Image (spheres, rainbow, N blue to C red):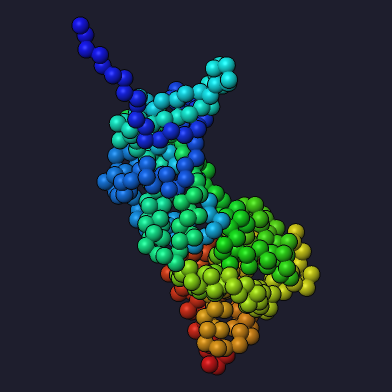
Amino acid sequence: MSPIIPIVQNQYSLAIPAHRFRQGGRDIYYFPLTLETLDGLLPQRVEDDVVREANRRLTPSHAKNIQLYLDEKDDWLLGAMMLGIAKDAVEFEPYSNEKGETVTPNFGEMRILTNRINTMRIFDGQHRRRAIQDVLAALAYNEHRADKLEVLQKSSMTIILYAEDKIKTLRQMFVDASQTKRIEGSTVTRFNRRDPFNLTALRLADNSRVLRGRVEMERSSVSSSSQYLLAINQLASILKGLEVGNNSRISRQRNDFYMMNLDDLYERCRIWIDEFIPAARNEYSGLLNGEVDNSDIPQLRAQTFAYNVTFIRVLTGCYRKWISEDKSWEQLADYICKASLNRGSSHGLAVDSGLLKPDGTTLFSRRQEVDAVIDYIVREAKEAAGN
């Protein structure tokens, strides 16, 4: 007589409502997980040796930035995490009606077998996963942040689980999933409202007498035939250079300070563009008083370097360096205004300062070259003013 083998119910690490569909010849399961559940489902700390097989190298600083973002922002947003798992590690039972009939094969309960969960691998999202681990762990040790911990634990993120566990295939999937178009600088500037220089650039584009109607909002640069002076992202970058220099990074604390003092930042930038720049170059005073129309800009750009973005950065650097010494900017503006910026000339400010070769047509734009030009102009302006 054969022995009776008792039927043992399968043990599951996770059972959750999910949407099942197919893509690229494989089953995919789409569902939300609370951060607390995710932390328990993938308890192993994300280190470089954990993700190297199916992912790019872990960058701890990137994970740290996401951790701080989650910790500091209440309106945070994280994209979906992508994972692979062995096909036989997942069971799916479609929902049925009261008659036991399948309502739809695409919606039901997805279950991951406990003895097969070790086949699960992150192939896109390891930095987010590491950040979630670290922020929950840090908050757990801070009794004063219990409310923030609870909110994060109960918050959810989207999981996309692919029925695939072959390393080579997961690597290819990671590359394929990364083939997204980079967000243009102009779009980042217009949409990222956490950056004080983005906000100030947008405000100047609407209100500055020199810039109003002359800032490109859609593209990230201006062509030689453009009637715009600058792209909005170029303006934001120049404003940052005006305030902190071209070589400096802004800490979170300083960024928060600027965000709390946007009116003061705007006023300093407005003086630069609506008062100093027109005083320093007649090309801009013409725009200010209406003698130069926007339609004239392409023709003038072909004649002078004054509308060149690199030269505007030079003007900005000179202004910043001059006023940092508690000097009134009028003498600097007077020196620059008298200098020649004509294209095609073997002399003039661009050539004499080293910003342009005598027979060149393109201004040097590397940081060290621009810095040297700024030093030259400021030094010559001081001598001209008798300082």
The residue sitting at 62% across, 57% down in the picture is 190
Is 140 or 220 nearer to us in this picture? 140
Identify the image quadrant of residue 196.
bottom right
Residue 232 in view (yes/no): yes
Q: Is residue 205 above or below residue 150?
A: below
- Of all residues, the one furthest to the top in this rendering is 1
- List x then y, in percent, for residue 331: 61, 86
Q: How many numbered tags mark residues here?
A: 0
Left or right of 122, for residue 348: right
Is 163 or 9 nearer to us in this picture? 9
Is 55 or 236 nearer to us in this picture? 55
The residue sitting at 78% across, 73% down in the picture is 289
Residue 360 in view (yes/no): no
Left or right of 318, for residue 301: right
The residue sitting at 47% across, 45% down in the picture is 34
- List x then y, in percent, for residue 52: 30, 43
Q: Quadrant of the N terminus?
A: top left
The residue sitting at 62% across, 60% down in the picture is 232
